[in-house]
Image: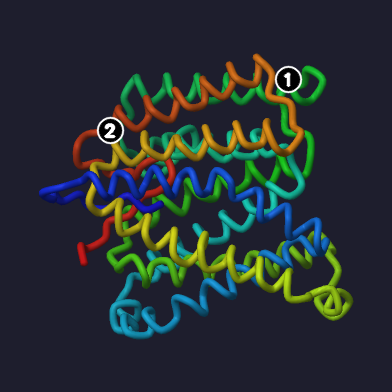
Amino acid sequence: MFGPRFSMHKSTTFPGFLVVTIGALWGVYWVPVRKLEAMIAAGPWVTWGVVLVACGCLAPLAWKGRKSLAASNTKALLSTALGGASFVIYSNGLIYGHVAVVILLFYLTPVWSTLIARFYLGWPTSLWRYVAIVLGLAGIGIVLASTHNGLPLPHTLGDFLGLTSGILWSIAATGINVHSKTRAVETNFIFCAGGMVMALLLALVLDRPNPDAIAGDFGPAVLGWIFVVGSLWWAFSLTGFMWATKRLEPARVGILLMSEVIVGAITAGLFAGEPFTGFMFLGAALVVAAAVIETLSKPAYPHLGVVRGAGRQELD
């Protein structure tokens, strides 16, 4: 999630394997999310419970690093919290939208990252990154057209949540890249705390049932799933990801993370009853190609992080 200041280690095999595995794990994230929604239709309130569990898991270790957090740049903390907020929006997009479409909309990140770097930060932009923008927009246009009666535009609530999450993540990743220096656990704690705030805002904006109205539905099975998602996906996998990316070249991280797109699209087509047509395959391939080109177009020590993350962090 957060590609760091790169430092060469003797072996990158395990970190690389970890990135691929975590990407694949997030590719099936839609499964428990939709399972929870089927058990208790509470939308963002369930997401709030999930990130609350994650914060609880991370709190003891984050407390040990409180001095580092206290000394952190305010912009770094806000950027990290915004990253968590973007993931909560993405999580809810998977509930209300077509899984593969939401994932691909999120992975338009190279488009927004390039535009932010060029026009807001004033960083030079190579021709290849403009090629990535064209491919990414063309790809998602084909995907949307194939799922929304020929209109290459976002249509459902899930579409707009997926698009918004990708844009916000690009902004957050840029800020993390420029300002953040905290360790993986501390970073993820702030990340999840930002997610809690966004989940609450979404619950209010989307007018979901309040917790008191659905309290009786929170049985052991629901609470168990909330604990699994909060601990496995949010607390442990994201912390592991942040640790691993400190030990890999950002370009490699960006390519390895394509496992999420591939696994998400395949599993949604097989198990969610969502069609994955030839046009969707073509659009997905263009989005993936855009992400790979955007990643490989960066120098060995980039200013802007990889597709799904950026961040200059000190090695543990």
Question: 273 or 136, which lies in front?
Answer: 273
Per the image, the residue denoted by label 1 is 146
> What is the quadrant of the C terminus in the image?
bottom left
Closest to the camera, between mark 1 and mark 2, is 1
User: Which residue is drawn at the image coordinates 82% and 20% (left, top)?
Assistant: 149
Residue 43 position within the rendered picture, expressed as x and y whole percent measured from the top left: 76, 60
Per the image, the residue denoted by label 2 is 298
Residue 157 position within the rendered picture, expressed as x and y whole percent measured from the top left: 77, 44
Q: Is residue 136 left or right of residue 209?
A: left
Question: 23 or 101, which lies in front?
Answer: 23
User: Which residue is drawn at the image coordinates 45% and 81% (left, top)?
Assistant: 59
Query: Element type at marker 2?
Result: loop
Question: 96 or 34, which lies in front?
Answer: 34
Query: Element type at marker 1?
Result: helix
Compare marks 1 and 2 and give the one earlier in the sequence. 1
Query: Which amino acid, mark 2?
Result: Lys
Whole-number angstrom distance, CA of label 1 to CA of label 2: 32 Å
User: Which residue is drawn at the image coordinates 30% and 28% (left, top)?
Assistant: 296
Query: Which amino acid, mark 1?
Result: Ser
Quarter where residue 228 is shown: bottom right
Residue 253 position within the rendered picture, expressed as x and y whole percent measured from the top left: 33, 41
Quarter where residue 302 is shown: top left
Label 1 packing within 10 angstroms: few (<14), some (14-19), many (20+): some
Q: Is residue 102 left or right of residue 64?
A: right
